[in-house]
Amino acid sequence: MTLFAWPSALRASAIHLAGDRWIADGIHLRVTVVGELGFPLHPFIALRLLDFQAEPVTVNWVGTDGQRLVEPFSIASAGGQARGVVLGRSGALNPAEWLFVEVSGDGDLKVEALDPFGQRAVATRIGSPYRLTGSSLSQLRVSGSGRINSVQALHADRVAPRVPGAVQNVETTFGLPLAGSPWYASSPQPLDDAKQRLLLGRSVRFGPPDRPDGSFDLLPPDADVHLVLGHWGPERVDDWLKAGFLDPQTPPPATRRTESDAHVPPRSVSLNVTDGLLIMGADPRLARYLGLGTAFSPAPSVLNVPFGVWVVAAQWAVQAARLPVDGPPVALLVRDGQAPPELQALLDARFPELPTVRGHFNALNAALRPTEQWSFVTLMAAAVAAVNAPSEPPDAPSLGQGLGSWTARGPADPETWTQHVLLETATIGPIAFARTRPDGPSSLHRKEPPNDPAGRAVGLLPARRTNGPTALVDTAVPVDPAGGAWRIWASDEFGRWGPASADLAAPLPERPPPPPPLLELVFSPAAAVADPAPRSPGTLTVRVSLPDPGRLPPGAGPLAQLVVSVDGVAQPAVALAPGAAAAPPVQVAAPVGPFAVGEQRLVQVSATFADVDGRVSPPGAASRIVTDPRAYPVAKTGPRLIWTGRPDATGRAELGLQWPATGSQAQYRVYLGDERVLAAALGIGVDPTTPRAERARVIWQRRIELTDKSRFTLITSEPIAPSADRVVRFQHQWPGTLRGVQFLRVVPVSASQAAPGLPVGEVEAAFEECSLVPVAIPTTDRPPAPTLRARFDSATGAQITVEARGLRDDILAERSFPATGFKPECRLRQTRARLAEPLYMPVIATALLTEPAAGSDMWTHVHVKPPDGMPAFVRHMWVAEVRYPAEPSLAPGVNDVPSEVSSLFPQPQDAEGEWSAASLPASTVAIPAVAPAAVAGATARRLPPTGVFVTPRVELTVPIPGFDARTVAPWRVAVYTHAGANPPSLAGEPQDAPGPVFTTFFAPPLPDKLDVALVDPVGRQGQTVSIAVDPGPP
């Protein structure tokens, strides 16, 4: 903690001038206040302190090679330059707070005091005496030639304790030129005081902002008074003062003001009033007006000492608990530099209105949060002026080239460009900025008042960057092939100008290319023709509006050429009249490349401008979905009905159609129309007794009249595409109870999917030109089961008579009987199985029924099966079924037209009827007309005894001709035995033959001859045959 304020919060500086080129003679004081403090509650008061002497100090000197130097030393031994750190005063609150440093040396020296970071010179002397003043002079730099003998200095720790005893030595006060403020206790005559300050601290001559050509003529003594009090004050500054200090409800730190300039559109800036006034006070003339600076004639006692010391003090209202957006907390800013009670008593006595001002702030606290409440702090800062040894004006700035760019302009404005000039040297006060070419040197400062010959250039503060050098901008550089050049002067905070910088030259900025063209596309389709070969779908007209020369990018050259590319094909270049204003749009028409039938794709169009120097613009692009207007050929159809499958167990009938695709990108929509709806649209009736083939023909022949798509139902949610074999397959189900005719209209659709993400566009064939496909569901009508009569005649065979009654005439008429010649049919099933199950009985014959005789409704058919095809004595079971005639798919007498649409599933051309239930079975048995023939091939032999049979036996073997296991009864064998001279005797009842060979055995007494006869299944016995017994080996 120190008794003096932080320099970053409150800093005072002083300079003694006598015979200066720029500023009037006298002691000049400047005060710099941070924005968080703003203006005090009253004018600053300056106390003069007397009888100080500098004391020897120790400096750690280092040469350019890092070698330690000990006083005295020569600059040559330091390598031409030396840097030194003044050691802090022992026991001081801030050991490095040196206010005055004098370097004793011989020769031609340059002595500089550096900022605490050792980067920037804050005070410079080039000539004896080498006296430097500031607020914290702890680092030194010396250069030139000669010797450094010793250093002496004055520390703030010696000045602060003397303040209470100096309260009677008030040198001057200086404050705002404002009276009647509830927030400020002004002096009795504030405006007169400001005028006096302007006179005492007046500018002696024109400076570089006004006369960059170097003609720094002398100014009248009252020039600053006339400028500030006559113009700058009432025209600019006073409005800010009134806004901030005359509102009884809002204190100055809480007041904001917004100003707009004459720019089109207007640009505005909003600032805290205190910040805005402090920025204005950066100009030394306005600083004197606002009470941030003053000047006075030094007392004789001051001129007899090496330096004079003043302490500047004031009281502020602060929100100590507030935390600024950036920077240290307010409480930390005001921690140091708080004045002693004697000084506070002086302020209260000097400014009687001060307690009232504090009362206004205190009245606000009742409505404020603790962090926003106001408190009061009195701060002071020391200012030291070296007598007859002022610090040198700033050195010539070092410049760097920044960004150059072309300036936007109106159609009638001359072409200009903008150049950023980088100020690589940090400055304290305003700068002068001038363009030396072209048309220079000319000042780049705003003049106020602008049209008054007495107007003066307003000072410039370079825009400070957080990183890197500060920048100044010349926004209206005239165009010259050689580019431009600039010069900058820097001033100190009192208004003294240093030498000019070296001119910074910069070439013209690179001119930008023209802007990309804006394209408008209009497509004109070609006429649709039947030719399926690839061809251009039409013409694409590209319309390009030419920008007005005044609307080109800043710096862009006049347009000279337009090049358009359509679908990847560059079109001939179009020459443009350079610089032509209000030129009509350019139109380029080009055919699009070949498309397949109905193809659709995204056609890309690009265009570029070129200026007179050949610079090419970025391409302007546009795209258009283009579709070939041709449709694919429609599938050819005829009037013949195509049948669905029969209804399944769920009652649904399925239709399957197929047709060849007519194009590489063809897809198809299928529409369904009911005959009743379509007939109504055609104005005809539907007679359900008329055969469906005839009804289909009538509507099919008038298909071209069915143009209204709303009469149909779209049954394909998405267009169907062909399979890899280029065949389109379509399946659809509908209720199997529909008895009418349905019509399908297959409509080809062309579509392209070539571009990913492209919405599907299409060309659909003309609806009325697409043919109709008549479709019907086969009926399920079945006649009653027939009756069956069967008989067998051994001469002619089996005769089966089928008799069918109850066939409906209306159904026969629907089947176009008798026009087609189609008749009801019957089919016979036959089996030799004992059970007649029709499902498992094979069909042996199908035949047409014979029409009934007159007056009868019985349809008949007689089936004859010859006897040679029927095994004897086997029962044959017969059943019969009948059905109505097949329903014709084409009306009688109608010429068939070949159709490209066919059924997907194999099926007969005409819809066959369903078979009736089977008749009751009938049976036949083939019985030969005569008894069985004599046995042929029978044998008898004697068998010797064996291990099982101990006596000999006779074996008889008889073949059974025509044996069949399915006979109605078994074959039997009758045997008679002969023993010696005894007559033959029957050997028991005839025995059943179990197979095609009958075998039996005889035990002793053994016969020597056998008589054998066959008995057929109906009991008829054939002739007897005698068979001698073979005695076997002896």
Image: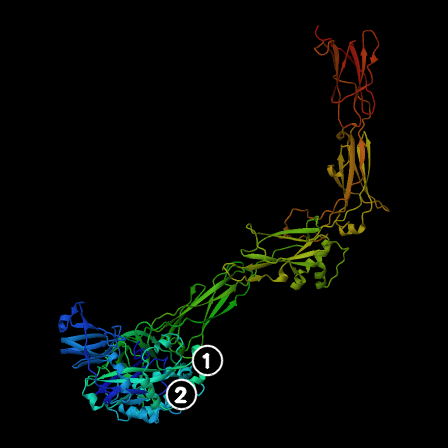
Residue furthest top in the image: 1034
The correct choice, above or below, for 522 with respect to 548 in the image is: above
**Picture coordinates of residue 101, whole percent (x, y):** 20, 79
Say whether marks 1 and 2 touch (CB < 8 Å).
no
**Crowd tier of the residue under label 1, counting other residues whose Cα lies within 10 Å: few below 14, some 14–19, many 20 or above:** few
**Residue 357: assigned label:** 2
Colour convention: rainbow
Q: Let me know if residue 98 appears in the view.
A: yes
Q: Let me know if residue 864 appears in the view.
A: no
The residue closer to the viewer here, 455 or 179, is: 179
Regarding mark 2 in the picture, which secondary structure is present there?
A: helix
Q: Which residue lies at the image location 75% right of the left edge and 24% below the top edge? A: 963
Q: Quadrant of the C terminus?
A: top right
The residue closer to the viewer here, 93 or 503, is: 93
Q: In the image, what residue type sits under mark 1?
A: Leu
**Picture coordinates of residue 469, whole percent (x, y):** 30, 74
The correct choice, above or below, for 2 with respect to 904 in the image is: below
**Crowd tier of the residue under label 2, counting other residues whose Cα lies within 10 Å: few below 14, some 14–19, many 20 or above:** some
The quadrant holding residue 949 is: top right
**Residue 713: assigned label:** none
Regarding mark 1 in the picture, which secondary structure is present there?
A: loop
**Residue 368: assigned label:** 1
Q: Earlier in the sequence, mark 1 or mark 2?
A: 2
**In the image, is 704 to the left or to the right of 478?**
right
Q: CA distance from mark 1 to mark 2?
A: 18 Å
Q: In the image, what residue type sits under mark 2?
A: Val
Q: Quadrant of the N terminus?
A: bottom left
The residue closer to the viewer here, 756 or 907, is: 756
Q: Which residue lies at the image location 74% right of the left edge and 22% below the top edge? A: 995
Q: Which residue lies at the image location 20% right of the left edge and 91% below the top edge? A: 300
**In the image, is 885 to the left or to the right of 433?**
right
**In the image, is 171 to the left or to the right of 791?**
left
